[in-house]
Amino acid sequence: METIDVGFLSLVPPLIAIALALITKEVISSLIIGILSGGLIYALSTGGGLIEMTSVSFGVMADTVGSPGKFNIILFLALLGALVYVVTKAGGSRAYGTWATQKLKSKRSAQLATSFLGMIIFIDDYFNCLTVGTVMKPVTDKYNVSRAKLAYLIDATAAPICIIAPISSWAAAVGATLYETGAFQNELQAFMATIPYNLYALLTIFMVIMLSVIDLDFGTMEKEQIRAEETGDLGAVRTTDLTDEDISDKGTVWDLILPIGSLIVFSILAMLWNGGLWSGEGLTVAEAFGNCDASAALVLGGFWALIVTFALFVPRKLISFRGFMEGIGEGIKSMVPAYIILTLAWTIGALCQDYLGTGAYVGHLVQASNMPQGLIPAMVFLIAAGLSFSIGTAWGTFGIFIPIVVFICQAAAPELITVTLSAALAGSVFGDHCSPISDTTILSSTAAGCDHIKHVSTQIPYAVTVALCCFVGYLAAGFSMGNLWLTLGTSMILLCVTLFTMHRLTMRRLDREAEAAVEEAE
């Protein structure tokens, strides 16, 4: 089946799915309705009926999940679910949580540790989300950090870190896309050139650190944190059926560190291996990471981590052979909601990109806009964000939008090409960060054990705050012809002022509430 031009209707399926999800707080049915609406639009536009509508909808789903990359992610989720379950059952997670709370003495340190771990694991965003959630959940739980806040910390240090990490699965994809534009000498130079102007990534990292240091929350996130601290209700979604009686009391800290460490080591080795480091072609480590198939490598890493875990647990009788095998099955079942949501999100994204021509429609609007030169970076940032939010993928947005950005800059503002490409990358990550149908958003809520729509609704105010500062920064970039210090300085100062203002307002409100409570008690 070929892509058709349905104009504005190409935006209808994701808008329906996102609106329904935010209104009903139920994501699966919302995505299904969005997919069927897309199938209906395609069928009516090609002269088909209800049979073609369902054929298109489920055909896209089969093609999407059947692709090697997507199926590998499902396999990795299954293996990770199994690993987390058996590690928990063997007592490793509980022992680690007890140890970590002795070392991390406050909620602030727990949040900072979560943020820094997310920054360290920059190889792949999927890997980042699930590993950070597994390791830090016991620690943040001890200090009553809500699961919504944990999900935000995970999500904010996944894609925003990967998009500025030269050695990552993202660097390979982005560098190749940028290099194909002909504006750079090689892929690494292309990627490195965009880092200083990638305001959303840089400001998000700064904001995560500041929120953790000053312990500031606002919007719907503040309500989640107050409830967590006052009632102990973290807003957790139960992912396992384990009770305290089912968990071994013989587990040690090493029973979490070694399985997770082996997952990291084997995944990195697998990336280097399938990237061709040892193929005899003389590739560097950076080039091997650039050539690797990250999803296939994660599957290999998950499999060998399970083997290590089996050898670590069963001979020591932390868990029986039968219990280990049953744990694998239970862990896989715990990931079923994530499989379903990911499958539906991938389907609606593929339907929009490959069948309804959403990207081509947005690109046509941009080309026909004739916007003033100084507005180009800021407007590209907004348009990329809207497209990424609609189709739920930053990578898809890169592929669709970057060639259009190059065309616009070559015609209207060649001196702004690096800034504008950076704005396209930043906007894509922002839209992906906010979208309920984004795979990294789904994986972040899964890793944190948080309701998916609650994660989306609580992190949007934080993401939008950063995005508004980025927008102003890109205005400064456009009208200053790409002056880096003015661009960075404007956006960073604006974010600092915003956070300082929010902190002062929060402190004053808390003081008033405390005074009112004292007066009421008297």
Image (spheres, helix red, strand yellow):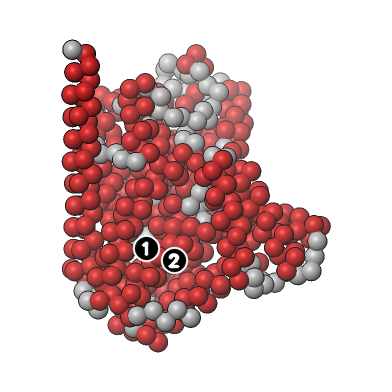
Residue 407 in sight from this viewpoint: yes
Helix, strand or loop under label 1? helix
| Residue 375 on image: x %, y % | 33, 74
Q: Residue at x 39, y 79 (%)?
A: 371
Q: Quadrant of residue 41?
A: bottom right
| Amino acid residing under circle 2 | Ala
Q: Is residue 364 left or right of 131 when viewed as pictured?
A: right
Q: Reply above or below: 127 against 281.
A: above
Q: Reply above or below: 397 against 207.
A: below
Q: Reply above or below: 182 against 142.
A: below
Near-viewer residue (456 or 323)? 456
The label on residue 145 is none
| Residue 5 on image: x %, y % | 64, 73
| Residue 327 on image: x %, y % | 57, 27
Q: Work out whether mark 1 precedes mark 2 in sequence or the reverse, and give the earlier one.
A: 2
Residue under circle 2?
384
Local packing at callout 2 (Cα closer than 10 Å; few below 14, some 14-19, many 20+) is: many
Near-viewer residue (120 or 509)? 509
Q: Residue at x 71, y 65 (%)?
A: 42
Q: Are marks 1 and 2 in contact (CB under 8 Å)?
A: yes
Query: What is the C-alpha distance between the residues marked 1 and 2?
Result: 8 Å
Q: Quadrant of residue 338?
A: top right
